[in-house]
Amino acid sequence: MRKARYMAAAGALVGVMVVAGAAQAQIAPRSKAPLDIAADESEILTNECKSIWRGDVEALQARTRLRAQTLNVFAAKKGGECGETERLVAEGQVYYVEGERKVRADNAVYTSRAETITLTGDVVVTEGQNVARADRVVINLQTGQSQMFSNSKGRGGKNRVRAVLYPSGKPQ
């Protein structure tokens, strides 16, 4: 009985290592640091090359942080094994912090091939005293370039992309 429990625990650990080991995602721009994920619970779906992290999830890489209620990690299938991480999907009260830039949103998707993070749902970006709002923000992690989008159009439209920017970085 003890051996069976040991084998089950060892099998679960190997499953975690197979899927989480593939998590060479880059939430931190140009970083070779490991991705450190903590949550209240984790589920590993080895056959799907997917891991699900639930409950106050925090992913750290170098000095970059991603927080959410749920984080799904998808790895590429290579034959019968899981390869590199293809994407991360964060849901519920998402916070992304990279340097001075802080972003709050409802959802976020990191795509490794494009090296982008797309944040959606009542997005608020702050950097120093500067504040911007949008329905969707796409951040290119290689270049640092951001694009902001709104579902509303036209001068009188509600919830258009909006920003308050301080040229000197300080309010006057």
Image (cartoon, rainbow, N blue to C red):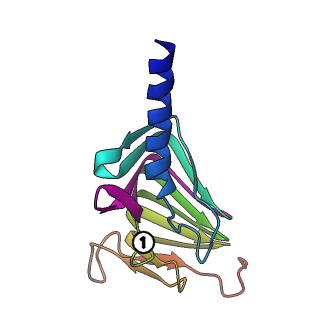
72 on left or right of 127: left
Q: Nearer the viewer, residue 28 or 48?
A: 48
Q: Residue furthest top?
A: 1
Question: In the picture provided, is 170 more to the left or to the right than 137?
Answer: right
Residue 157: give x, y in percent of width and height. Answer: 28, 75
Q: Quadrant of residue 105?
A: bottom left
Q: Is residue 87 above or below residue 1?
A: below
For the question of whether residue 27 can be seen, the reply is yes
Location of residue 164 with respect to 48 vertically, above or below: below
Vertical arrangement, residue 123 with respect to residue 56, above or below? below
Q: Which residues are magenta?
A: 63-91
Q: Position of residue 26 (x, y in %)?
A: 53, 69
Quick one: 110 or 130, which is closer to the camera?
A: 110
Instruction: Give the image quarter of residue 28.
Output: bottom right
For this rendering, which residue is in front, 96 or 30?
30
Amino acid type at image mark 1: Ser
Whole-percent x and y of residue 51? 40, 47
Report if residue 101 lies within the magenta region.
Answer: no
Q: Is residue 76 magenta?
A: yes
Q: Which residue is mark 1?
A: 112
Q: Position of residue 171 (x, y in %)?
A: 71, 76
Left or right of residue 155: residue 97: right
Q: Which residue appears at 39% of the width and 79% of the height?
A: 114
Q: Nearer the viewer, residue 101 or 171?
A: 101
In which quadrant of the rendered image does the C terminus lie?
bottom right
Q: Residue at x 27, y 74 (%)?
A: 152
User: Number of marks in the image?
Assistant: 1
Residue occupying the point 50% across, 38% down = 13
Dominant secondary structure of the residues highlighted in magenta in the image? strand
